[in-house]
Amino acid sequence: MLNRSLEEIEKESQLMDSRNYYVVEKNAIIQHSKYNLKESQGKSLSLLEKKVLLYIISRIKPTDTELKEQVFEIKEFCDICGIEIAGGKDYKYLKDCIGKLADRHMWLEEKDTITMVRWINKAIIHKNSGTIRIRLDEDLAPYLLSLKDNYTQYSLHNIIKMKSKYGIMLYELLHSYLYKGNEIRFDIDTLKELLDCVSYTDFYNFKKRVIETALKDINTYSELKVSVRYVKDKKAVKYIYFNVIDLEKATTLEDKEEGAKRYSNVEKEIDPDQLTLYDILYSHKRGLEE
């Protein structure tokens, strides 16, 4: 303890702060609009884009009545999200990521209207201070502020070290349906659309590269303990059933110990093989997003 550097202590403090960052979103965004599902065709938000977006959303205060400009340090973002800082190239990688995120749009559908909304309205990077100023699109306010019902809330701490975009997507999706009970069923084709991976026509590849990859992330880093079973209709798998246990509300000693273990692991120092910003931004070239 006495030999710990100031940098190590600061990093631990930032990770502890992540406990107090909560992502709160209306279910409609997660279940219908968030990943621009019908139009993205396998090009939904990347892993880094998701982390940037969720980090920004988690900084919204419960008392906020408008979407204020968020100001944060690149180093703070990297430390909290468990991303290794890679020399002096971080500005370029993060700038590329924010630029791509700003170009993304989704359609928010209400009773009589369909509104096209972009995630980011404005972004400014201050190179000397190493800070970023970002403002979300004001049309997102009804989906992120003062939510009373039909919303999902979780700690940023539960997804910060996930290494797959499918892990975050499935995690949010399952969270948004937990109000229905611990067993959640999806039709295979519907789930592929929700996870933006309709290109996986072969069930084995879909199971291996999407579902199992996502569950590995969820069951390693989050507070959800998820098991899965597949149900066939004739010869083909038709439905996927997810059984979900919230370890933060665990009633058995085994689940309580598992929850404490996961929580502790997330707070440890960044692993030696931790992904860098470059790895995460360009992971599609290495197959890490699969």
Image: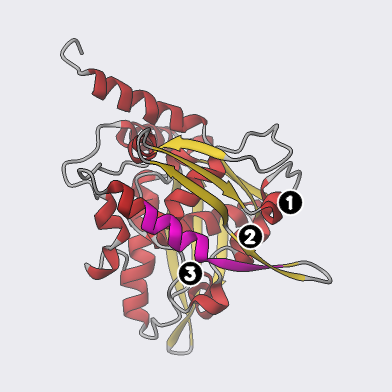
The answer to which image quadrant residue 215 occupies is bottom left
Residue 253 lies, with reference to residue 246, above or below; the image says: above
Q: Secondary structure at mark 1?
A: helix
Between the residue at mark 1 and the residue at mark 3, the CA separation in whole angstroms equals 24 Å
Does the rendering let one see residue 154?
Answer: no
Residue linked to disc 2: 29
The residue segment tinted magenta is: 95-108
Q: Is residue 74 in view? A: yes
Q: CA distance from mark 1 to mark 2?
A: 11 Å
Answer with left or right where residue 138 lies relative to residue 159. Answer: right
Question: Is 110 part of what is drawn in magenta?
Answer: no
Location of residue 125 in the rendering, given as x and y in whole percent from the top left corner? 43, 44
Give percent across and percent down for residue 185.
56, 67
Q: Are marks 1 and 3 in contact (CB under 8 Å)?
A: no
Of tags 1 and 2, the one toward the viewer is: 1
**Farthest right residue in view:** 112
Residue at 30% in and 44% down:
83
Amino acid type assigned to the residue bearing label 3 in the image: Leu
Percent x, y for residue 29? 63, 60
The residue that mark 1 highlights is: 142
